C-alpha cells in the first residue's frame, strides 16, 4: 500500500477530528500540523509547526487538509495552499461557493495541483443526496432538516442577553414535519416549520428568569418565530451535559413516477461528534483527490465530480465483489 | 439540449418503468422498445419492435436499457447489446457480478461502447451507500434491511402448497432491530432477526386453513426461522389491495470515530412502485454513460465509478450553485 502523506492546516476542533480520522485509515500518514499559534505553546507530538513553515513541506506532503473557518481563513488559505499542495476543504458559505471554486481551481491549475472544495456533510454528503435524489426523481420536492445539533450563532445570541452567563442552543428537527414528508404529503415548510429551538441557559445569581426567557423567546430572527424551549441549568450541568458537539439531520426527497406512484428517498446522519465526522469525510476525500492527482488531474473538484470508488482504499474489483 | 436516444430491451414491469421515467426527463427520447413477443400482439405505439430488429438501430439509438431478468436474459443480452450500443442494466445476482462485469467490459471495449452494469437500488443506490459509509467510517458495522416489499420467491413457495390458489408475501424490516442499530447498540443480527414475513393467502374452497398456515410457518429456509404472519383473504381482496409493487429498505452504518464517538449514517427508500423507481435509476445512469461515451470512454462501469454530476442534466456550475 502506498502511503498518502497528509498535512493539516488549522488545529481547532475540525483539525483534531482530521487527526483522529487519519489514525483510522492505514493508508494515511500524518506528516505535519500547521497552526498560527506558537507551536511551542502546544502539547506537541513534534508534528506541530507554525503555518509559515508549510512551504518547506512541498514534496513531503501529498494532501493538505484545510481546517480553517470559511469566513476569513479559507478564502485566503484555499488558493494559497492549492498552489503548493493537493488540498481538501470544507468551505461552507453556500452563496460564495461558485466564486471560491473558481479561485481555487485557477490556483490549483497554475500550480499543477488538485483540490476538493466544500466537502464534509453539508455541504458534502447532504449535497450528494440532494443531487442523486433530484436526478432519479426529477418531479418532486426536497427537504433538508438539521439537528439535533448546536447552533453557534443562536448560542451566541443568548449569551449576549444581560444576566446570561453561558448558553447552548440546539436546533432540533420537528418530527411532525419530518413525518408529513415521510408520509408523502409534500407539505410546504419554511425553516421555522421544520425546526424547534432548545436552549440551555446559565444565569448570573439573582437574575429574573422570566425576563430572560421572554427576551430569548421574542428575539427577532433568532427565536421569535420558532417553537423555543428554555431550560435554566447550572454551570456544572452545562459543562457536563452540553459540551459535546453532536449534530446531524435529514435530506428527504418526495417524488412521483409513472401514474402517481409516490417514491421517498431519505438520507440521515446522527452524529455524536460533528468535527470528528466532518474530519472523517475530509480524509476520505483526501484519498480521492490524491488518486485524481496521480492520474494527472489538475484543478478543483467538488464531491459531485468524484466517484465513490475513489473514496475507498479497496480496488474496483474488490468493491464490486464485496459491496455492490 | 442534445437529446439522448434511448432503446428499451424487454417490456415487462421494469421496461414499462423505464418507459415512464423517460417521459419525465426532457433530454431523453424513447427511440424503440424491443421485445421477444410478437409486437403486433401488443398495444403498439409504433415503437415496439421484435428484438431481432435491434441491429438495424445501430447509429439511431445512443443507449440501450436492458430490462431482462438476471437469471437467463442478461448473461446473454448484456454482452450482445454492449457490442452494438452503450448499455445500462440492473444485473442483480451478487455472486455473479464480477464475472458479468468482465464479460460486458470485454464486449463493450471490442465494440467501442460504454456500459453501466448492476444499477438500480440494490445493487445500485444501496451499494453506493454501503461504500460511502464504509469509506467515511472505516470502523463500524453495516446493516441492510429490505422491505416493506413483495418477495417473489416466497410468494411462489406459498403458491406451491396444496389448496393455495394465490399468495403474496411481504418482507418487512423488524423495527426492533432497526431501532437497536439506530441507537448505536451494534447488535449482531442474522437475516431472520432483521425481517418479518407477512403472507396474504387465497385458498381453494373447503381447505383446512390451520393445515395451510402450519405448512407455511414451518417451511424450512423460507419461513420456519422467521416471525411469520399468515392472513387468509379473498381473491378479490388480494387483487385489489396486494397487486401494487411497493418495496424499499434501509442501509445503516454504525461507526465510531476518535474517542468512541458514535456516528450513524442511514439511507432509506420507501417506494410505491419498485419497477418505476428502478426504471428511474436506470434512466439517470443512461444519461451518465452517454456522457462518458462522448468523452471517449469504452468498457464497463458500475455506479461506484460514476460521479453524481454525470447523473444530472445540469452543468457543473449550475449544480455547485443550486445543490452544493
Image (tube, coloured by chain):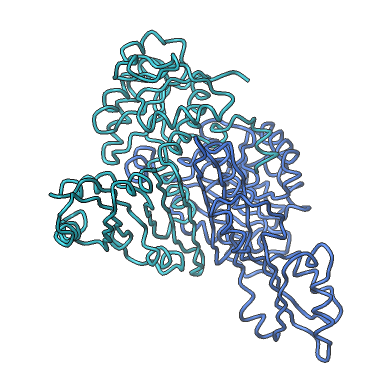
Chain colours: A cyan, B blue
Foreground pick, A170 / B297? A170
Q: x, y (%) of residue B96?
A: 76, 44
Task: Name the residue: 68% across, 54% down.
Answer: B189
Say which quarter of the image contains residue A1: top right
**Residue lying furthest right:** B162
Which quadrant of the figure contains the C terminus of chain B?
Answer: top left
Q: x, y (%) of residue B212?
A: 82, 80
Asked if A225 appears above or below B208 in the picture, the reply is above
The answer to whether one can see residue A274 in this image is yes
Asked if A217 appears above or below A91 in the picture, the reply is below
Say which quarter of the image contains residue A141: bottom left
In this rendering, position of residue A55 left or right of residue B17: left
Q: x, y (%) of residue B196?
A: 68, 67
The answer to whether one can see residue B18 in this image is no
Task: Name the residue: 38% across, 8% down.
Answer: A56
Which quadrant of the figure contains the N terminus of chain B?
Answer: top left
Amino acid at each position: 500500500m502506498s502511503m498518502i502523506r497528509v498535512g493539516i492546516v488549522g488545529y481547532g476542533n475540525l483539525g483534531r477530528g482530521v487527526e483522529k480520522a487519519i489514525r483510522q485509515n492505514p493508508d494515511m500518514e500524518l506528516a505535519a500540523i500547521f497552526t498560527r499559534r506558537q507551536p511551542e505553546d502546544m502539547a506537541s507530538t513534534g508534528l506541530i509547526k507554525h503555518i509559515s513553515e508549510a512551504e518547506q513541506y512541498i514534496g513531503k506532503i501529498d494532501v493538505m487538509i484545510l481546517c480553517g473557518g470559511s469566513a476569513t481563513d479559507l478564502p485566503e488559505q484555499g488558493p494559497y495552499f492549492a498552489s503548493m499542495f493537493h488540498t481538501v476543504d470544507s468551505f461552507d458559505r453556500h452563496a460564495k461557493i461558485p466564486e471560491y471554486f473558481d479561485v481555487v481551481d485557477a490556483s490549483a491549475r497554475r500550480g499543477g495541483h488538485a483540490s476538493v472544495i466544500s466537502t464534509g456533510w453539508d455541504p458534502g454528503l447532504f449535497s450528494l443526496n440532494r443531487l442523486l435524489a433530484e436526478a432519479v426523481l426529477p418531479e418532486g420536492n426536497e427537504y433538508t432538516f438539521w439537528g439535533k445539533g448546536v447552533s453557534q450563532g443562536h448560542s451566541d445570541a443568548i449569551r449576549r442577553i444581560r444576566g446570561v452567563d453561558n448558553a447552548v442552543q440546539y436546533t432540533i428537527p420537528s418530527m411532525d414535519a419530518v413525518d408529513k414528508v415521510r408520509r408523502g404529503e409534500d407539505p410546504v415548510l419554511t425553516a421555522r416549520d421544520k425546526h424547534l429551538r432548545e436552549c440551555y441557559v446559565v444565569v448570573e445569581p439573582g437574575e429574573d428568569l422570566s425576563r430572560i426567557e421572554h427576551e430569548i423567546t421574542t428575539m427577532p430572527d433568532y427565536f421569535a418565530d420558532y417553537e423555543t424551549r428554555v431550560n435554566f441549568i447550572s454551570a456544572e450541568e452545562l459543562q457536563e451535559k452540553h459540551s459535546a458537539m453532536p449534530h446531524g439531520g435529514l435530506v428527504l426527497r418526495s417524488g412521483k413516477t409513472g401514474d402517481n406512484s409516490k417514491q421517498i428517498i431519505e438520507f440521515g446522519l446522527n452524529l455524536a461528534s460533528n468535527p470528528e465526522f466532518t474530519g472523517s469525510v475530509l480524509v476520505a476525500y483526501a484519498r480521492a483527490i490524491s488518486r485524481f492527482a496521480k492520474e494527472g488531474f489538475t484543478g478543483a473538484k467538488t464531491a459531485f465530480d468524484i466517484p465513490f470508488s475513489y473514496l475507498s482504499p479497496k480496488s474496483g474489483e474488490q468493491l464490486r465483489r464485496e459491496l455492490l
